[in-house]
Image (spheres, helix red, strand yellow):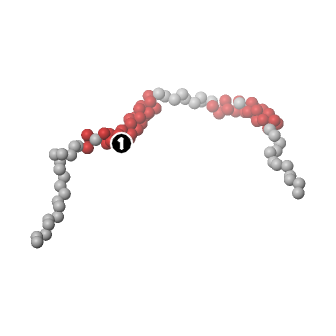
Amino acid sequence: MSPTPAPQHTLVTENTPSWWTYGHVWLVLAGPLLVVIASFITMYIAYTRVDPVVDENYYQKGLALSPAVQSRDHTEAVHAPASLSMPPVKP
């Protein structure tokens, strides 16, 4: 009896289609590709549309609002409930 030769595994290139012919490959690649495209669009929008500049006197305008803010805080403190604790339980 002669030993049987081990099967040899070879790639058959003429019968297997290329990787780009499979639809699920494009489905997997579409997500990251869309994210990259969206990031470039976002970067373009960020660089072409200028944000409004903060007012030079923002600190002084904030100090001018201080009395109104203090009055509002005082009014809220007066109308707030005194305590939210539970009454003591009698034994």
Q: Give coordinates of residue 24: x percent, y percent.
A: 33, 42
Q: Classify mark 1: helix, strand or loop.
A: helix
Residue 78: image quadrant is top right
**Residue drawn at (54%, 28%) of the image:** 52
Query: Toward the viewer: 13 or 34?
Result: 13
Residues 64 and 73: in front is: 73
Pointer 1 residue: 28
Q: Quadrant of the C terminus?
A: bottom right
At x 14% / y 66%, what residue is drawn? 4
Image label count? 1
Tag 1: amino acid: Val
**Residue 7 placement: quadrant:** bottom left
Badge 1: residue crowd in 10 Å (few <14, some 14–19, many ≥20): few
| Residue 1 coordinates in the image, percent (x, y) | 11, 72
| Quarter of the image where one finds residue 60 | top right
**Most foreground residue, 30 or 24:** 24
Residue 86 in the image: above or below residue 44: below
Residue 15 point in image, percent of width and height: 18, 45
Residue at left 38%, top 41%? 32
Residue occupying the point 78% across, 32% down: 71
Q: Position of residue 70 (x, y in %)?
A: 76, 34
Q: Is residue 37 left or right of residue 85?
A: left
Is residue 63 left or right of 40 when viewed as pictured?
A: right
